[in-house]
């Protein structure tokens, strides 16, 4: 027994080490780095060099649900509601109607070219309908080269929020296949209640967590991620228990944490970013173990045709219809269509089909796996090239966060604020001593072009500087902030003060 455990730890640690070292290139290659993890699993599988026989779809699905919860939550806390507020309606449309359209279009196409029933064809369409959160988030993690914010934020929101809809469709269609009958009223009620319960549970538990997290004052900072983890899985389990959408509850939970003041938020971001990566590595390696390369070769022609149809026809139709009459132009829509990356999520949904349908679902699982590989190797590799060709890519300066926890400092009696120097602000090319800051006000750090500057009285401010300002009291923080603003604002303030002095 001890030898087995040692061998397991040896193999697992080597895979993890290789995966972490390969992740160094993830910002350059995007999704393909995740596919490498999957290939490691295939090589280690029964038809590979490792010879590990693993075909437990039920265990895979159970572990995958845990990993997906962590990945979706990490995506939620990385998404700022303010960034998506302008296009929130379009994002919701893409993650709901877009999923339905993709399911229908792919379903009818698959029924025409494969010898499977219409329900099984729609099941295949539903498993392929959602863009993958892990794939999209990893593709946009290059801090030095970024897609314009409007398109990137919409894609990140869509990928994080369309899994619940796709999962709902997969479970409903599987229910039809198992029972061979259905009632329209039952579907309608589930269609309405499923997201509503998920939203409600996510909102309630987010409020409860934020209140508890900010007052509990745990002795060890390392326990705050554990507290968050308990609420994370409470979201999924409670929502699922009441026939709600557990994935949606988890995503809303993460989204609301990002939008509120939460103690140790910076620490939580770092912790769950690492956990998300570990989940992705484990998930892709495990899914790779499930694959039999010999079966992939047999379905390669059909799989390639379906992949091309999904990428070049079904996805663009769904995107262009959902973004019709929006501010997004043709280039935006074309890029968003191309960026509908597939990853582990469709394979997880296919493993659920395998649990419910047994050997009957092997063709679905194999085609889904093949489509994911094609999507990764075609879309993932060319994503930045396409963005650049459309003029949607720009070079960005790596922008590290301040090495302080703002939420913790805000618990003190001092005022603290992060101020960004914008174009035409009064502070540009002014020294610290020129700003007439309130008594006791200090400029602690200036974050400039990827590095930190500790200023003195003669330090001049430049455009795009981010400044951490601390005042004696919270009442002084707005006065200090105004000292950096546009000259017209400062002039008005000056004359108002003079006028008040003359009045008195």
Image (tube, helix red, strand yellow):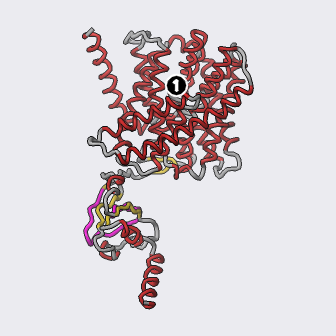
Left of 358 or right of it: where is 462?
A: left
User: Which residue occupies the foreground of this view, 270 or 242?
Assistant: 242
Q: Does the magenta stretch mainly form a helix, a strand or a loop?
A: loop
Task: Tell me where residue 114 appears, x and y as whole percent.
Answer: 68, 16
Q: For mark 1, does the 10 Å Cα neighbourhood hold few (<14), some (14 to 19), or many (20 or more) residues?
A: many
Query: Which quadrant is the C terminus positioned in?
Result: bottom left
Left of 296 or right of it: where is 321?
A: right
Dot 1: what SS? helix
Judge whether residue 339 can be spotted in this image. Answer: no
The residue wearing badge 1 is: 373
Task: Tell me where residue 153 appears, x and y as whole percent.
Answer: 53, 46
Task: Tell me where residue 208 appears, x and y as whole percent.
Answer: 45, 43
Vertical order, 16 against 207 (above or below) = above
Is residue 466 inside the magenta stretch? yes
Residue drawn at the location 47% of the way across and 31% of the way down: 69
Question: Across the whole image, how many numbered discs are drawn on residues?
Answer: 1
Task: Tell me where residue 97 appears, x and y as whole percent.
Answer: 67, 37
Residue drawn at the location 36% of the way across and 70% of the way down: 476
Can you tell which quarter of the image residue 198 is in?
top right
Magenta stretch in the rendered image: 452-469
């Amino acid at each position: 027994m001890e030898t087995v455990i040692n061998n397991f730890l040896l193999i697992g640690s080597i895979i993890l080490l290789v995966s972490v070292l390969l992740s160094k290139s993830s910002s350059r290659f995007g999704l393909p780095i995740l596919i490498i993890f999957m290939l490691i699993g295939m090589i280690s599988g029964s038809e590979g060099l490792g010879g590990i026989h693993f075909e437990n779809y039920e265990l895979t699905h159970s572990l995958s649900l845990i990993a997906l919860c962590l990945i979706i939550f990490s995506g939620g806390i990385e998404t700022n509601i303010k960034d998506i507020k302008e296009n929130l309606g379009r994002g919701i449309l893409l993650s709901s109607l877009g999923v339905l359209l993709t399911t229908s279009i792919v379903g009818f196409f698959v029924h025409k070219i494969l010898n499977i029933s219409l329900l099984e064809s729609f099941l295949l369409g539903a498993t392929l309908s959602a863009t993958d959160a892990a794939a999209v988030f990893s593709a946009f993690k290059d801090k030095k080269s970024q897609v314009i914010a409007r398109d990137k934020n919409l894609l990140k929101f869509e990928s994080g929020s369309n899994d619940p809809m796709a999962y709902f469709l997969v479970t409903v269609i599987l229910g039809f296949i198992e029972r061979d009958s259905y009632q329209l009223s039952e579907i309608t009620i589930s269609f309405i209640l499923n997201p509503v319960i998920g939203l409600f549970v996510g909102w309630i538990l987010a409020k409860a967590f934020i209140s508890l997290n900010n007052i509990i004052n745990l002795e060890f900072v390392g326990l705050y991620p554990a507290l968050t983890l308990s609420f994370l899985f409470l979201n999924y389990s409670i929502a699922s228990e009441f026939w709600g959408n557990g994935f949606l509850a988890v995503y809303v939970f993460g989204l609301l944490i990002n939008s509120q003041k939460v103690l140790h938020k910076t620490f939580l971001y770092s912790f769950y970013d690492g956990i998300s990566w570990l989940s992705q590595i484990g998930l892709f390696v495990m899914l790779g173990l499930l694959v039999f390369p010999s079966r992939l070769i047999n379905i390669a022609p059909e799989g390639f045709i379906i992949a091309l149809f999904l990428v070049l026809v079904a996805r663009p139709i769904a995107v262009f219809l959902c973004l019709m009459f929006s501010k997004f132009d043709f280039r935006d829509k074309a890029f968003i269509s191309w960026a509908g990356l597939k990853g582990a999520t469709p394979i997880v949904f296919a493993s659920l089909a395998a649990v419910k349908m047994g050997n009957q679902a092997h063709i679905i699982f194999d085609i889904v796996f093949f489509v994911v590989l094609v999507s990764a190797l075609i879309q993932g590799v060319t994503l930045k090239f396409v963005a650049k060709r459309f003029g949607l890519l720009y070079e960005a300066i790596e922008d590290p966060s301040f090495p302080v926890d703002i939420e913790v400092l805000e618990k003190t009696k001092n005022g603290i604020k992060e101020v960004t120097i914008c174009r035409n602000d009064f502070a540009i090319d002014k020294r610290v001593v020129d700003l007439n800051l309130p008594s006791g006000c200090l400029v602690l750090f200036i974050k400039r072009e990827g590095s930190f500057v500790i200023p003195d009285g003669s330090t001049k401010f430049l455009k795009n500087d981010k400044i951490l300002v601390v005042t004696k009291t919270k009442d002084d923080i707005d006065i200090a902030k105004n000292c950096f603003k546009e000259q017209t604002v400062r002039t008005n303030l000056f004359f108002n003060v003079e006028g008040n002095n003359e009045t008195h």
